[in-house]
């Protein structure tokens, strides 16, 4: 748990969460932070709230105590977003301080009732509305719907130029003592960039069109500091995380980087026979490749790799007239995240019937993924020399395509 000063009147409260599946689903081997912020004018506002993952508020109150903020003195609680990683503390704060006002969007106020049966002292805000805390602290609010739920707003303090962006511009990765970009080495910044793209692809990727609109809206503000709900605070170079997010949403429709993600699975080693030759060709072609075996690798990492890759290779056999189940469920998840317009190659072994291609085509069509395949190639049993030669030619073709259209 940390309390630090963003500026003289703004404090960040931060805790790290480990050993959970985020949203009950995503592996977070490097943890994640939950951030909230105190803004002090003549009145005091708290923006989002951190608490122990079990919902116990002692962690929040302990942090407030360190900056001499009595929870009873809080005038406003800004809930940028009702997902419980930002709002789960509110019930406990209400118990000890029934007098503060909650500031949120209209959709969030509806969720307040259904989540916490709370309907009192709610101020619903729209684009550009403001609350004056005194002492030059005027908070303004901007609707950024679907980043990540329809209720989401961002809060802006014009005096300091701080954008409290909630899920926007967030990242996975626990934060230790250095919570600010100006305190980090280039290696540490690289670490958070990798965690940011993993966060983006896992959590907000489906909403890339709203993300684009929201970033355009935020760009109109004189931002000097980006203070997200997850990850580090960007106060030396806030444009970096904004530019990074612009790249991330552009990857949805492709092209992405000059990279290929190879997703493969094998039952008895027949499809597996093709993997080393494929990797050798990609090495010769000097194309970066992310390799994921299914079901062994987790979907969180596969999504991250696929999000930044222009090319996808699926190597998986037929299983009971359809595609090997963990491979088809992976493709389906990529479709649910709206990973569009990839250049692709399929190959796989079948024992007696085939069927993987039909299954894959149905999944890609249903999700409107619009992947363009250089080939869909099935071989019977172990691949023959002719099969290897054919696959080699198609891998080269895909590699050349990725290099020609992918981004640096
Ligand atoms: Fe960090 Fe959508 O909650």
Image: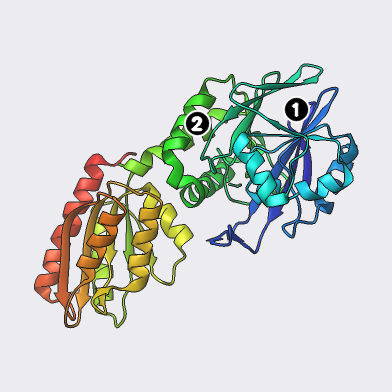
Res 275 quadrant in image: bottom left
**Does residue 93 appear left or right of residue 229 in this picture?**
right
Front-most of 35 and 391?
35
Please, what secondary structure does the residue beneath circle 1 have?
loop
**Does residue 151 appear left or right of residue 176 in this picture?**
left
Residue at the image point whose x is 51% and y is 25% from the top: 217
Mark 2, other Cα within 10 Å: few <14 / some 14–19 / many ≥20: many
Q: Which residue is mark 1?
A: 7
Task: Say which label, 1 or 2, has the lower sequence index.
Answer: 1
* Relative image position of residue 266 (x, y in whole percent): 31, 76
Please, what secondary structure does the residue beneath circle 2 have?
helix
* Relative image position of residue 51 (x, y in whole percent): 76, 51
Front-most of 47 and 387?
47
For residue 51, say whether it is visible.
Answer: yes
Q: Using the image, determine if residue 351 lies above or below residue 87.
A: below
Dot 2 beta carbon under 8 Å from ligand 1 = no
Res 237 quadrant in image: top right
Residue at the image point whose x is 52% and y is 49% from the top: 199
| Labelled pair 1, 2 in contact (Cβ < 8 Å) | no
**Which-is-in-front pick, marks 1 and 2?**
2
- Asked which colour scheme the image uses, the reply is rainbow
Residue at the image point whose x is 25% and y is 49% from the top: 370
Q: Which residue is mark 2?
A: 214
Q: Using the image, determine if residue 124 lies above or below residue 252.
A: above
Q: Give residue 77's mark.
A: none
* Relative image position of residue 34 (x, y in whole percent): 68, 47
């Amino acid at each position: 748990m940390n309390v630090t000063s963003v500026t003289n009147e703004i404090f960040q409260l931060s805790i790290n969460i480990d050993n959970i599946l985020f949203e009950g689903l995503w592996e977070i081997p490097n943890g994640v932070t939950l951030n909230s912020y105190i803004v002090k004018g003549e009145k005091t506002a708290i923006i989002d709230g951190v608490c122990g993952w079990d919902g116990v508020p002692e962690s929040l109150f302990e942090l407030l105590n360190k900056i001499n903020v009595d929870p009873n003195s809080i005038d406003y609680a800004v809930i940028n977003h009702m997902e419980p990683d930002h709002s789960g503390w509110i019930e406990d704060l209400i118990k000890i301080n029934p007098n503060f006002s909650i500031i949120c969007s209209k959709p969030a106020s509806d969720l307040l009732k259904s989540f916490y049966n709370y309907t009192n002292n709610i101020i619903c805000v729209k684009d550009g509305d403001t609350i004056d805390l005194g002492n030059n602290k005027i908070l303004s609010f901007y609707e950024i719907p679907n980043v990540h739920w329809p209720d989401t707003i961002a809060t802006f303090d014009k005096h300091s130029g701080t954008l409290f962006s909630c899920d926007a511009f967030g990242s996975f990765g626990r934060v230790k003592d250095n919570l600010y970009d100006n305190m980090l080495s280039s290696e540490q910044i690289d670490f958070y960039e990798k965690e940011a793209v993993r966060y983006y692809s896992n959590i907000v990727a489906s909403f890339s069109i709203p993300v684009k609109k929201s970033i355009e809206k935020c760009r109109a503000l004189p931002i000097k500091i980006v203070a997200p709900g997850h990850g580090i605070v960007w106060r030396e170079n806030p444009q970096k995380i904004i530019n990074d997010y612009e790249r991330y949403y552009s990857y949805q429709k492709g092209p992405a980087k000059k990279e290929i993600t190879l997703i493969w699975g094998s039952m008895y080693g027949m499809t597996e026979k093709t993997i080393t030759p494929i990797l050798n060709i990609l090495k010769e072609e000097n194309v970066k490749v992310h390799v994921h075996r299914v079901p062994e690798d987790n979907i969180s990492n596969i999504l991250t790799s696929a999000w930044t890759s222009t090319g996808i290779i699926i190597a998986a056999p037929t299983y009971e007239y359809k595609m090997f189940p963990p491979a088809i469920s992976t493709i389906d998840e990529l479709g649910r995240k709206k990973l569009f317009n990839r250049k692709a190659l399929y190959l796989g072994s079948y024992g007696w019937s085939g069927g993987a291609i039909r299954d894959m085509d149905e999944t890609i069509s249903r999700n409107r993924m619009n992947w363009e395949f250089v080939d869909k190639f099935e071989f019977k049993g172990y691949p023959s020399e002719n099969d290897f030669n054919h696959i080699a030619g198609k891998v080269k073709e895909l590699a050349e395509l990725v290099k020609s259209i992918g981004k640096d």
